[in-house]
Image (cartoon, rainbow, N blue to C red):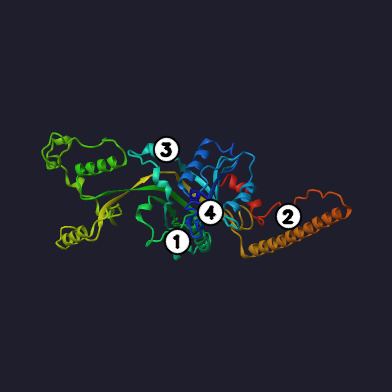
């Protein structure tokens, strides 16, 4: 009698089945997920649309890279689906009526939201055209980039002016940007998985006179995206060509790049002879790299499993000093820019997701009495909103009971989760600043 078949590929209990698709402690669940959205899909233009695609590639792999927007989509359409999809951050790019490109970074589901104005930006294709040897994508986007932040917290003496950025805002923006990518553990994270670097450099202004208070209130961030390229140091150009060709032969059946050594009697002729195989004498600048760009990394290449006798011989040779026992090698590190480039200027911080109380504004500053009055107005609006939601819920229940008692089919009642929308949730800021945001001078 034939043995019964047990399906092990897609069923429960299989290695890639439904029960094992996403383990409880996997990074796919714990890691942050972003959604880069193009608001007003038909009105932003081709440049901003390409910028959205470049930002999605920069946020890989934890982002919705194939998201399709429609011109009729609103913010609520995305926030409704962000919860079931496990989205933790929303990046919304839009263009204002005056032609300014804006970026909103919101922490989902409770906020806060950072509003930026994109003062300058360069697309990935423009960056590649400016480089002599651009680097492609490929496996670089299979792991999240390494986040490097600079000058996000200013020294104490620079925060004394009343026009400067408050200290709690610096801490808040630092925490939000750090949460964009999963944390890296130096003990467990392999170096080979870190292939990209995302650099965020804040420009700290240095006002010298009383007229520079406007510059002191600016919060400007420069964003750069690089790929990490490494190569072994201490080797001549000819030896590096042989190593590169050997790796190419392992990956694909092609001899492209392999130097022609058929007319030579010894490989030393290729390295030392100035006319052999088109290679010349190497200078010190070719074989020696800058020590500041050198790092020591462990050898992570796969090795052949040795027998006991081979292991003993290897240990003996290491004891005789023929081979190093550390397994480390020096490699030169070089950063190749991938793009995009952006210069972001923070204009506003809101308490909720693209709405709510304004926590800080670049163009307006309020006194303590005005802030207290704004807090009082905000608390009053919150109480009135809660009361409207309660009354609405009671009315819906009464209508359902009346329909049930009369035996009629209940009407379709759509209950608004947010109740009645307030016409102004900013607490008195946006009315004063609408003209300033259109033409700040």
Q: Residues within 10 Å of mark 3 (few under 14, many from 20)?
A: few
Q: Are marks 3 and 4 in contact (CB under 8 Å)?
A: no
Residue annotated with mark 4: 12
Residue 403: percent from left, percent from top: 85, 53
- List x then y, in percent, for residue 221: 46, 52
From the image, tell me which residue sits under label 2: 419
Looking at the image, tell me whether mark 2 or mark 3 is earlier in sequence order: 3
Residues under labels 2 and 3: Cα distance? 47 Å
Q: Secondary structure at mark 1?
A: loop
Q: Mark 4 or mark 1, which has the lower sequence index?
A: 4
Between tags 2 and 3, which lies in front?
2
Q: Secondary structure at mark 3?
A: helix
Q: Earlier in the sequence, mark 3 or mark 1?
A: 3
Residue 365 visible in the picture: yes
369 vs 262, left or right, is right
- Where does label 3 land, which residue? 126
- Give the answer, above or below, for where 163 lies relative to 412: below
Residue 253 drawn above or below residue 419: above
Side (left or right) of 293 relative to 196: left
Dot 1 crowding, Cα within 10 Å, few <14, some 14–19, many 20+: some
Using the image as rendered, state which of residue 228 and residue 298 is in the foreground. Answer: 298
Residue nearest the observer in this picture, 404 or 73: 404
Residue 214 position, x and y percent, is 51, 54
Residue of label 1 = 154
Which is more N-terminal, label 4 or label 2? 4
Relative height, residue 360 to residue 262 (above, below): below
Distance (Cα) linking label 4 and label 1: 54 Å
């Amino acid at each position: 009698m034939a043995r019964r078949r047990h399906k092990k590929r897609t069923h429960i209990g299989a290695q890639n089945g439904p029960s094992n698709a996403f383990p409880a402690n996997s990074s796919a669940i714990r890691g942050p997920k972003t959604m880069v959205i193009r608001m007003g899909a038909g009105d932003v233009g081709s440049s901003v649309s390409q910028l959205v695609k470049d930002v999605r590639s920069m946020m890989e792999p934890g982002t919705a890279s194939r998201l399709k927007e429609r011109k009729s989509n609103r913010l609520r359409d995305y926030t409704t689906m962000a919860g079931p999809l496990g989205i933790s951050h929303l990046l919304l790019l839009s263009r204002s009526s005056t032609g300014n490109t804006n970026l909103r970074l919101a922490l989902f589901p409770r906020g806060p939201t950072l509003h930026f104005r994109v003062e300058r930006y360069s697309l990935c294709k423009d960056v590649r055209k400016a480089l002599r040897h651009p680097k492609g994508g490929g496996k670089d986007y299979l792991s999240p980039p390494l986040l490097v932040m600079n000058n996000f917290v200013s020294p104490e003496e620079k925060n004394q002016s009343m026009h400067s950025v408050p200290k709690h805002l610096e801490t808040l923006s630092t925490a939000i940007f750090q949460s964009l990518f999963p944390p890296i553990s130096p003990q467990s994270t392999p170096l080979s998985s870190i292939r990209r670097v995302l650099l965020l450099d804040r420009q700290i202004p240095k006002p010298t006179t009383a007229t520079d208070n406007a510059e002191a209130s600016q919060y400007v961030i420069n964003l750069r995206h690089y790929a990490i390229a490494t190569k072994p140091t201490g080797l001549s150009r000819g030896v590096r060509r042989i190593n590169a060709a050997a790796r190419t032969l392992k990956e694909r059946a092609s001899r492209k790049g392999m130097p022609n050594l058929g007319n030579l009697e010894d490989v030393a002729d290729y390295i030392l002879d100035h006319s052999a195989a088109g290679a010349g004498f190497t200078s010190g600048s070719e074989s020696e790299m800058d020590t500041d760009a050198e790092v020591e990394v462990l050898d992570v290449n796969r090795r052949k499993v040795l027998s006991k006798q081979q292991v003993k011989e290897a240990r003996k040779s290491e004891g005789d000093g023929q081979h190093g026992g550390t397994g480390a090698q020096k490699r030169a590190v070089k950063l190749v820019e991938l793009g995009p480039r952006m210069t972001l200027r923070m204009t506003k911080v809101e308490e909720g997701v693209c709405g709510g109380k304004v926590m800080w504004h670049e163009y307006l500053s309020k006194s303590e009495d005005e802030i207290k009055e704004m807090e009082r107005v905000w608390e009053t609006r919150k109480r009135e909103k809660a009361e409207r939601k309660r009354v609405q819920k009671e009315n819906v229940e009464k209508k359902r009971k009346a329909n049930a008692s009369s035996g009629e089919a209940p009407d379709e009642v759509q209950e608004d989760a947010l109740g009645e929308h307030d016409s102004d949730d900013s607490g008195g800021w946006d009315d004063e600043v609408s003209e300033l945001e259109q033409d700040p001078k």
